[in-house]
Amino acid sequence: MAMRMYDLILKKRNGGSLSKEEIEYFVNGYTRGEIPDYQVSALMMAIYFQKMTDEETLDLTLAMADSGDKLDLSEIKGIKADKHSTGGVGDKTSLVLAPMIAALGLKMAKMSGRGLGHTGGTIDKLESFPGFRTALSEDEFIRNVSEVGMAITGQTGNLAPADKKMYALRDVTATVDNISLIASSIMSKKLAAGADVIVLDVKTGSGAFMKEEKDAFRLAEEMVQIGTGAGKKTVAVVSDMDQPLGYAVGNILEVIEAVDTLRGKGPKDLYELCEALGSCILTEAGAASDRMTAEKMLREVISSGAALEKFAEFIRAQGGDDAFVYEPEKLLQVKEIHDVRSEKSGYVFRILSDEIGTASMLLGGGRQTKDSVIDLSVGIVLKKKVGDYVEAGESLAVIYSNSGEKTKEAEERILASISISDTKPPVRPFIKGIVAAHK
């Protein structure tokens, strides 16, 4: 008997589980345009209320991963790793982590999107380097991963088109917020991108998609389960995004901070995150027997300068001017550098990440719509983090701007987002936990 979308909606609405065949039927039918939006909307709403089993979630992810092109990385020798971040403010992790891993002889094959929101994505940040090409053909991508050990490219080809179509629909039907649907959306793209090891950087806190820690862990567990079910070595690191990562928020400013970190002079939290993610990759790939050994290997590629050299080689391989790797501050072109001074003395008690991100976006450092043009030089560099003491009149942050009017607006937001208290806030762990597959 032929399947009907009506029956699938009814089954799910009444709390039933969809079979693998039923899920493939609706994903493929919708991708080909044979099933209308309104029926898929109804199904998404039924899923939103009735939830999905682990089996359904895995079947949905695999069906979406199979809905378009899949990247075949089999001709690249060795273990291929990929990393995904759920996004945050000041997140320049890939720029540091990928060269560290590649300098140790492993392969990082990463596809990145452009950022919508506070700052650009990894792709926008890399375009700070004159001549750098982010649109690589599949052959170039594979060749660069093979020869350099890493490549970062924009989304090429037609990867997981079902996810793209379904996400746009969920976005306008209030069905984004479901752990199974979020996890399958992220993992379908990662599975289509072809790596053997997938490390997930899941953020929690005011500047994260998952504001609550328990939700971040649920998402991490769901994604690790999907990856493992699909035969990939998958690990997630849950980290804090209650304040921006590092000090810099903006595109070129974040590139400068990433280079500082590759020189061993970067912010403690950024390095700690790269070390946690990197040691997960090394242990899962079998390149290190345990995390302590992995951490030591990662520290060595920083202190020897090998990771910075690898970053320069990568910039060069994709057409960029690698001279700026050694002097990234020369990329900055701003009319105005303005200090935001504290109105009172005390301890920095809270920094609202998303507000700092919004201030950077208002300066021109992020996209309000997908057609917005980013000003790569503007942004904010924090001078204090949570727990630091500040004197009245001392600098809390520095604004890099090309418009006096925007500077004023950004300053007001920054001051409103940082609260100063007489008491020192409790110290909270930056890495909240690591989620690995149940062996």
Image (spheres, rainbow, N blue to C red):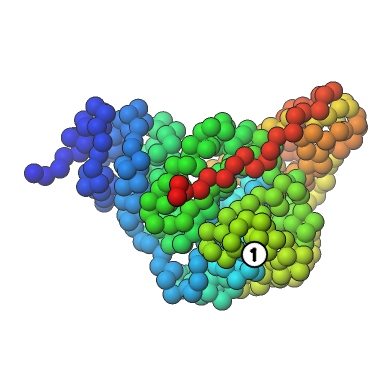
Residue 11 position in % (x across, y down): 21, 32
In the picture, the quarter occupied by the N terminus is top left
Residue at (76, 49) in percent of width and height: 267
Q: Residue furthest top?
A: 422
Residue 297 seen by the camera: yes
- Label 1: state its secondary structure: helix
Q: Is residue 277 above or below residue 103?
A: above
- Whether residue 18 sits left or right of residue 152 in the image: it is left
Q: Quadrant of residue 329?
A: bottom right
Front residue of this view, candidates 317 and 22: 22
Residue 53 position in % (x across, y down): 33, 37
Residue at which label 1 appears: 99
Tell how many labels.
1
Residue 337 position in % (x across, y down): 83, 46
Residue at (35, 46) in percent of width and height: 58
Front residue of this view, candidates 310 and 197: 197
Residue 39 seen by the camera: no
Residue at (46, 56) in percent of width and height: 233
Front residue of this view, candidates 281 and 131: 281
- Whether residue 166 sits left or right of residue 322 in the image: it is left
Q: Is residue 246 above or below residue 206?
A: below
- Whether residue 96 sits left or right of residue 79 in the image: it is right
Dot 1, crowdedness within 10 Å: few (<14), some or many (≥20)?
many
Q: Callout 1, which amino acid?
A: Pro
Q: Quadrant of residue 54?
A: top left
Residue 195 position in % (x across, y down): 46, 62
Residue at (56, 31) in percent of width and height: 212
